[in-house]
Image: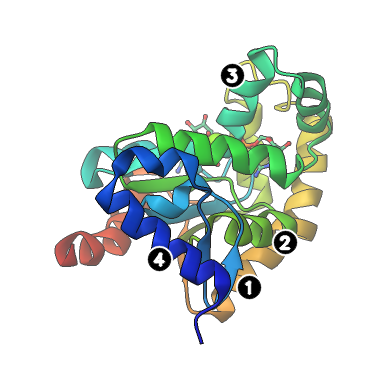
Amino acid sequence: MESLIGLVNRIKRACNNAFSSLGDALPSVAVVGGQEANGSALANKKVTVVFVLGGPGSGKGTQCTNIVQHFGYTHLSAGDLLRAEMKSGSENGDMIQNMIKEGKIVPSEVTIKLLERAMLDNGNDKFLIDGFPRNEENRAAFEAVTGIEPQFILFFDCSEEEMQKRLLSRNQGRDDDNIETIKKRFKVYMESSLPVIEYYNAKGKVRKIDATKPVEEVFEAVKTCFTPVAASS
Ligand SMILES: Nc1ncnc2c1ncn2[C@@H]1O[C@H](COP(=O)(O)OP(=O)(O)OP(=O)(O)O)[C@@H](O)[C@H]1O
Ligand SMILES: Nc1ccn([C@@H]2O[C@H](COP(=O)(O)O)[C@@H](O)[C@H]2O)c(=O)n1
Ligand SMILES: [Mg+2]
């Protein structure tokens, strides 16, 4: 039987179609696998999302730049959004700065709001979400709030030795690219982020890439994950 929220959604959709000016006055509710997701404005925007995961320095950002050029996705890096929020003078600035310096995961509420806003402000409907979800809290909260199920998970598998070497020579002035914070980030990755990848692997959603290879070779492998998707859409 249709739930009350499902009914409200149906009425809202009908109202939106009939009187588009009513849209903002009515709260939106997404329905996720039979459960009601609360109030994300994204409920009214149909989006395709690929989560791009892997350890610190595995090459997520580098490959996302290539994917954007070839397959028309918009790249949203959770880390970049948090750094921009920190620099914007937001009330969460100090907290974000401390969390990044310690390699810890910022509460989902903050990061999800930034991701939602970025997706809503963008005209595209295909997004690469890089570096999110980073822990079980990120994963469950994103699903509950937005109702979005990822198309697949692109997982860059890279040795810690190689990642450390890359991070220490990245030279982008990041506060967390120092050996002390890098060790903390590796620990958080092993303890909190890998279980999320395992969760999606059990659902058959993970496309694992050997990310220790040179950039061009990694991208050849990445392309094989997107080409079937691009061909069918
Ligand atoms: N396949 C590769 N081989 C060698 N160097 C690489 C490769 N991919 C990326 N790099 C370099 O390694 C560094 C880290 O790459 P990148 O910023 O893409 O990683 P990331 O996964 O986004 O890291 P983080 O999680 O810290 O944001 C950069 O200096 C980049 O130029
Ligand atoms: N979901 C996330 C993603 C990132 N962070 C914080 O930002 C740092 C840098 O992230 P990168 O993806 O750019 O490496 C990360 O170490 C976290 O402190 C987060 O909290 N939640
Ligand atoms: Mg990155």
Disc 2 residue type (three-letter): Glu
Closer to the observer: label 3 or label 2?
Answer: 2
**Looking at the image, do the residues carrying marks 1 and 2 touch, with CB atoms under 8 Å apart?**
yes
In three-dimensional space, the C-alpha distance between marks 4 and 2, rounded to whole angstroms, equals 31 Å
Residue denoted by label 1: 199
Label 1 secondary element: helix
Indicate which disc residue 10 carries: 4
Label 2 secondary element: helix
Crowding around mark 2 (Cα neighbors within 10 Å: few <14, some 14 to 19, many 20+) is: some
Residue at figure coordinates x 18%, y 62% from the top left:
233
Q: Earlier in the sequence, mark 3 or mark 1?
A: 3
Cβ of mark 3 under 8 Å from ligand 1: the answer is yes
Q: Which residue is at the front of the view, 30 or 196? A: 30
Q: Which residue is at the front of the view, 190 or 214? A: 190
Cβ of mark 1 under 8 Å from ligand 2: the answer is no
Crowding around mark 3 (Cα neighbors within 10 Å: few <14, some 14 to 19, many 20+) is: few
Residue denoted by label 3: 171
Closer to the observer: label 4 or label 2?
Answer: 4
Disc 3 residue type (three-letter): Asn
In three-dimensional space, the C-alpha distance between marks 4 and 1, rounded to whole angstroms, equals 32 Å
Residue at figure coordinates x 42%, y 47% from the top left:
128
Indicate which disc residue 91 carries: none
Residue at figure coordinates x 29%, y 45% from the top left:
19
Regarding residue 20, the answer to whether it shows in the image is: yes
| Quarter of image, res 146 | bottom right
Indicate which disc residue 136 carries: 2
Image coords of residue 42 (percent x, y): 46, 48
Image coords of residue 31 (percent x, y): 51, 68
Closer to the observer: label 4 or label 1?
Answer: 4
